[in-house]
Image (cartoon, coloured by chain):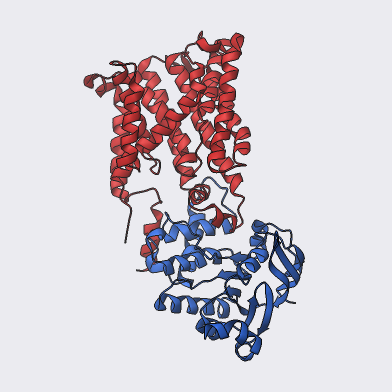
Chain colours: A blue, B red
Amino acid sequence: MSLLTLQNVSRRFGALTALNNISLTVEPGELRAVIGPNGAGKTTLFNLISGFFPPSDGSIMFDGEPIMAVNPAILVKKGIIRTFQITEIFLDLTVYENIRVAVEVAMGISLRPWINAATRAKVNARVEELMEIVKISHKADRVAGEMSHGDQRVVEVGIALSRHPKLLLLDEPTAGMGDEETNHMTDLIRSLNKTQNITILFIEHDMNIVFGVADRITVLDNGTMLAEGTAKEIADNPRVQAAYLGQAA
Amino acid sequence: MSSQATEIKHDAAPLQKPAFQQRYAFICLAVALLTVPVWLPLLGGYTDLASRVLIFALAAMGLNLLLGFTGGLSFGHAAYFGLGAYGTGLMLANYTHSTLLAVAVGTMIGGLAATLLGPIAVRRRGIYFSMITIAIGQMFYFIAVRWNSFTGGEDGLTGFSRQPIHMPGFTISLHTTSFYYLVLVCFAVGSWILWTILNSPLGHVFVAIRENQKRLTFLGIRVDVYIAVSFAISGFVVALAGSLDALLDNFTSPDNLKYTLSGNLLIICVLGGMRNFWGPLVGAFIFVLVQDYISSITQNWMTVIGLVFVLSVIFFPLGAMGFFRRRSRS
């Protein structure tokens, strides 16, 4: 069974059709890139899947259930977690505190007005584990707002992982990063997919990353789906070359 | 860095400075507060002044849970202060001779009002949230003014006084000094509750709400529920302070329900530093002292407070405690 299925999904904002009749499926364990020029509808697609707003038409199925009218909080519990184009973390808190609050929410103890030593130890262990996975442990006590953009992105991924995502949506995870940060993030995406077994859907502009990392690629252009396939299929697709890659070259 | 070392480090809660310094400062504060009746008269002060500092500090710390740690600017917390005061005053005037029962009832009335009314305000954010809190607060003000027969109207509520506390085997008469210690006990209990909450998962979420609501929503949290919880807890603490305020003066008036008091509590938080746990205590100290000293010279003491407030916002935006704060930057 596919993890995520979109059937004939459209989204209109007044007279503007941001997405028109999109159908796509994502299989469990897949690492899928979504590419397309600015205004192609990539972030709109993410907003629909993560429940930010409902589609105007069509159906979205996750794990065999329809999720068109489900609010973001419920979708998170079902396992759809996203990051944002503009990093959304807790800027005045340390890296450790950022991930800790996410862990406590994920553990379902966030309404408790006290904490005992045993629970605190459990929370600590999980936070340490997540910081290891995203490789940010050495900066645990840094205030997030004072760190580089790349590090903040990594913290955001750490926060997202706290909820044991089945489907992780990353909106331009490497945007605005230097080479070293980009490499770190690329390695992270790959290892989350291969070793943590998380299905990942990511929007990306950097073609080296897209073609180097993704199992499959979905190309959007002007709200419609232009093509879908492996890196090689996409690179050889004349329509994609004309509409998108052609412009870039 | 070994994970063992990081773990030990993390046991220090977010609000804490290095443990040793922290503990030292705390012990100094505790000793100073416990010995107030001894040293304050030597400096020309009087014990009721210290009681007032602690009462306003407790109220401001309660408000600050919502303001500084959850990021909700309430302009109507005087309502819960005043309800605590009126609840206690009316109990003692009409129904009971037990001071403690009156305090408990006053605190419950104010706290429950915040619990019921908070959810209305949290339906909106930012300036609209603040406007709703003012509107709700002023409602109680006008009820107190109009309902002459029950509340004493504009003249305020009189005809009650704090009664001796009867314990099995002994009796505590609440003269000035022993009343100060009652206030101190309430202040200590209130601070301990707030401290415990801020170091709990619930408190961590409060601070995270202040920082980024969108992130929390997409972690699967109903942010408005948590703000309402913060609102309610803060209401209970403020109501306790209001209840003690009525006992301090053996009097309460609609002024204790008015938005100007809400504003004063906000000023206290900002003066002392609303990002700091003890900030409101420092703010209350400054506020009450300036009020007491300047008002003996001129009626326009609020002008001086206003000036101090403006200067502090410009030069010490994090308040008096923010001036001293050091954050770990490794």
- For the point 29% across and 48% down, the residue is B20
Residue A31 in view of the camera: yes
Q: Is residue A138 left or right of residue B251?
A: left
**Residue B297 position (above or below residue A76):** above
Looking at the image, the residue that sits furthest to the left is: B42
Residue B188 in view of the camera: no
- For the point 40% across and 31% down, the residue is B57
- Image quarter hosting the N terminus of chain B: bottom left
Residue A168: percent from left, percent from top: 60, 70
**In the image shown, does B237 or B25 lie closer to the viewer?**
B237
- Image quarter hosting the C terminus of chain B: bottom left
Q: Is residue B162 left or right of residue A223?
A: left
- For the point 45% across and 30% down, the residue is B263
**Residue B174 position (above or below residue B210):** above
Residue A146: percent from left, percent from top: 37, 60
Residue A5: percent from left, percent from top: 73, 73
Q: How many marks?
A: 0
Q: Quadrant of residue B110?
A: top right
- For the point 44% across and 79% down, the residue is A183
Residue A114: percent from left, percent from top: 51, 46
Q: Quadrant of residue B121?
A: top right
**In the image shown, does A184 or B94 lie closer to the viewer?**
A184
